[in-house]
């Protein structure tokens, strides 16, 4: 109860489909990049219309889907939004409940400064206008886990409005092209969290936990479909989606369901639905035909929330008694979009590689530490980190912080490869050994397994000559223009050197000898 929640509102975003016979034929549009996570607080994000027109085939009907998201995200705070009670996810039920949380008569809300700062920083990160004056409202409705009979929120004059979130999606047959999209943010508001209902089916009873209700993220998706050029369709609301993956699946399913229903002569009901993740479909919860009257009214126990910037700060004001927007702007970390742009510009990497580095916790820091300690080209470092290193992590289901291979070890390995002390295949053997054997350095593994590349050019020349003499038919195939024959010769020489010769050097020697 009274857990701080940021609530973001997203207006409708559009996708165009062409369908016939109850089947959607064109397009799939789910803005999974628009969700945001945080802790202990909630907010609402809105998306602006996007139309991706697809030319329908003969006899097909064209459909446009409109999706708006309401995102509730917890603010990372030690105490609740309006009380001093601690916030602890694993605490026993009702062990962190103040008199205010229990709605005892005479108790008053005290606004948590940390939550206000987090809301302002969220608004700045999403390019919102920060309202210097915002208000709190009472939203009345009856539910067992809301003992006061109302919820304190910021419906009418929230802390931040009119923002945007720029994100990128992969498109194309191989999903190798990055396209930038923009989602509009209608408003961000601070909102009191309700309690949590715990349903005991065995005893046919419901228990209430007023510690807190939510996890880190919850999304409500409002979805409708219509024919382009016609009025918007009747929307349904899919409630309480707790991951980006379930959000995408729920939106996909609901768009298809509505198109199928309309093309088969049915009607879309204005209702609330839930997503059954086991069945992969949405199911009805309750209808919304009668608009609920929340009887919104100003919260009488909280004055207007006033914010300042450096220019409007009254002289002699105690900094601890006010929120300075400019100071919070300076504290903002570098945003992911900026970091990705820098990676692309600085290292010449593909945009999708920059996304991969930021999507895995700790991977960017690991990459940057390797870059600092190696002479290898950034392109090679990127390849090893995203393909070999990340591949091993996923295979073992490990986080970056749990990796047995350190950035220093990988940097040393790449240096050996860069100065041609070992071959690429030997480098992979060394990496596997590093993964299995803690404490050994790449140089020690190379020496112990005798993986160094041959440095004796004369010995390599003799091995190549002996290979050509021993396989005259393969030599004939090479001279006839068979491209695979030269690879076979390279393989034979490498086998003779126990993998210690560079394939590129072997090829150069063989080609020189064949042409002489």
Image (tube, rainbow, N blue to C red):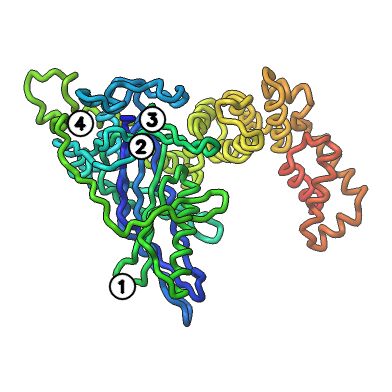
- Up the image or down, 17 lies above or below 487; here it is below
Q: Nearer the viewer, residue 429 or 309?
A: 309
Quarter of the picture containing the N terminus is top left
Q: Earlier in the sequence, mark 4 or mark 3?
A: 3
Say which mark, if any, is on residue 230.
1
What residue would you read off at disc 4?
A: 325
What residue would you read off at disc 3?
A: 212
Q: Nearer the viewer, residue 368 or 229?
A: 229
What residue would you read off at disc 2?
A: 144
**Quadrant of residue 413 within the rendered picture:** top right
Q: Earlier in the sequence, mark 1 or mark 4?
A: 1
Query: Which residue is found at the position 50% from the left and 53% from the top?
Result: 249
Q: Is residue 21 left or right of residue 167?
A: right
Mark 2 to mark 1 CA distance (whole Å): 41 Å
Q: Earlier in the sequence, mark 2 or mark 1?
A: 2
Q: Nearer the viewer, mark 2 or mark 1?
A: 2
Q: Nearer the viewer, residue 115 or 457?
A: 115
Mark 1 to mark 4 CA distance (whole Å): 43 Å
């Amino acid at each position: 109860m009274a857990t701080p929640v940021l609530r973001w509102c997203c207006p409708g975003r559009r996708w165009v489909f062409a369908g016939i016979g109850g089947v959607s034929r064109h397009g799939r549009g789910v803005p999974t990049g628009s969700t945001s996570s945080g802790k202990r607080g909630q907010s609402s994000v809105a998306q602006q219309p996007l139309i991706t027109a697809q030319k329908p085939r003969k006899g097909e009907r064209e459909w446009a889907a409109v999706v708006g998201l309401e995102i509730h995200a917890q603010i990372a705070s030690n105490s609740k939004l309006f009380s001093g009670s601690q916030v602890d996810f694993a605490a026993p039920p009702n062990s962190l409940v103040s008199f205010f949380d229990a709605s005892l008569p005479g108790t008053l809300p005290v606004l948590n400064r940390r939550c206000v700062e987090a809301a302002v920083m969220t608004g700045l990160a999403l390019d919102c206008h920060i309202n210097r004056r915002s208000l709190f409202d009472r939203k009345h409705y009856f539910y067992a886990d809301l003992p006061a009979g109302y919820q304190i929120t910021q419906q009418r004059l929230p802390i931040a409005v009119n923002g945007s979130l720029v994100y990128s999606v992969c498109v194309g047959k191989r999903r190798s092209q990055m396209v930038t999209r923009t989602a509009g943010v209608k408003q961000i508001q601070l909102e009191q969290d309700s309690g949590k209902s715990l349903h005991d089916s065995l005893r046919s009873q419901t228990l209430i936990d007023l510690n807190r209700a939510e996890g880190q993220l919850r999304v409500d998706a409002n979805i409708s479909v219509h024919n382009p050029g016609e009025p918007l369709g009747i929307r349904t609301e899919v409630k309480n989606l707790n991951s980006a993956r379930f959000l995408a699946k729920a939106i996909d399913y609901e768009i298809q369901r509505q198109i199928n229903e309309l093309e088969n002569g049915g009607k879309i009901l204005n209702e609330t639905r839930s997503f059954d993740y086991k069945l992969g479909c949405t199911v009805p919860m309750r209808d919304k035909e009668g608009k609920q009257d929340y009887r919104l009214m100003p919260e009488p126990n909280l004055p207007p929330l006033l914010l300042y910037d450096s220019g409007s700060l009254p002289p002699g004001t105690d900094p601890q008694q006010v929120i300075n927007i400019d100071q919070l702007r300076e504290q903002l970390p570098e945003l992911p979009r900026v970091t990705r742009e820098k990676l692309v510009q600085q290292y010449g990497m593909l945009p999708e590689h920059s996304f991969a580095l930021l999507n895995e916790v700790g991977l960017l820091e690991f990459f940057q530490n390797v870059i600092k300690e190696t002479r290898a080209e950034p392109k090679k470092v990127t390849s090893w980190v995203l393909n070999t290193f990340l591949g091993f992590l996923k295979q073992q289901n490990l986080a970056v912080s749990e990796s047995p291979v350190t950035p220093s070890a990988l940097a040393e390995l790449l240096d050996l490869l860069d100065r041609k002390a070992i071959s690429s295949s030997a480098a992979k053997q060394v990496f596997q050994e590093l993964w299995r054997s803690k404490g050994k350095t790449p140089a020690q593994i190379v020496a112990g397994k005798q993986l160094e590349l041959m440095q004796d050019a004369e010995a390599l020349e003799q091995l190549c000559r002996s290979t050509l003499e021993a396989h005259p038919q393969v030599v004939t195939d090479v001279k006839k223009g068979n491209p695979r024959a030269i690879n076979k010769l390279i393989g034979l020489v490498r086998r003779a050197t126990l993998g210690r010769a560079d394939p590129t050097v072997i090829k150069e020697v063989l080609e020189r000898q064949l042409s002489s």
